[in-house]
Image (cartoon, rainbow, N blue to C red):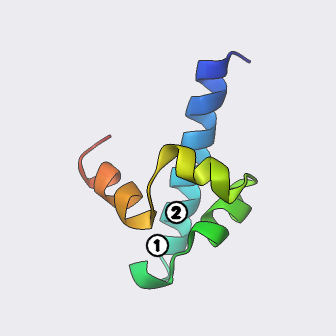
Amino acid sequence: MKQAEASAATKAALIDEFCKLYSSLPLEKVTVKDISANAGVSRVTFYNYFADPYALLDELEDGF
């Protein structure tokens, strides 16, 4: 898998896990630790893509 494809897949996994958590929890309870653990990546990897869960949500609302 090429780097760009792997990066896109990782970002998609983080977004997917965020959406799963956010569908059942208030945003204040959605943690970087939970998102990254559920996506199978480190918290450092999460921060390579997003500043925090709020920034992830902003990006989703902006349509990427």
- Where is 7 relative to 55, above or below? above
Residue at image point 56% right, 74% down: 31
Number of marks: 2
Question: Mark 2: few, some, or many residues within 10 Å (few <14, many ≥20)?
Answer: many
Q: Which quadrant of the figure has residue 26? A: bottom left
Amino acid type, callout 2:
Phe
Please say whether residue 53 is visible from this viewpoint. Answer: yes
Which is more toward the observer, 48 or 35? 48
Asked whether, in this view, residue 28 is left or right of residue 13, the answer is left
Quadrant containing the C terminus in the rendered view: top left
Q: CA gap, disc 2 to disc 1?
A: 6 Å
Please say whether residue 26 is visible from this viewpoint. Answer: no
Residue at image point 55% right, 44% down: 48
Residue at image point 44% right, 65% down: 53
- Where is 14 relative to 27, above or below? above
Question: In the rendering, at what x and y percent does residue 13 appear?
Answer: 61, 47
Question: Mark 1: few, some, or many residues within 10 Å (few <14, many ≥20)?
Answer: some
Q: On the image, numbered disc 2 is attached to which residue?
A: 18
Which is more toward the observer, 64 or 47? 47
Residue at image point 51% right, 76% down: 30
Label 2 with label 1: CB-CB less than 8 Å: yes
Asked whether, in this view, residue 11 is left or right of residue 52, the answer is right
Amino acid type, callout 1:
Tyr
| Extreme residue toward the top, this view | 2
Asked whether, in this view, residue 28 is left or right of residue 64, the answer is right
Question: In the rendering, at what x and y percent does residue 3 appear?
Answer: 66, 20
SS state under label 2: helix
Residue 22: image tag: 1
- Where is 32 relative to 39, above or below? below
SS state under label 1: helix
Quadrant containing the N terminus in the rendered view: top right
Question: In the rendering, at what x and y percent does residue 5 appear?
Answer: 62, 22
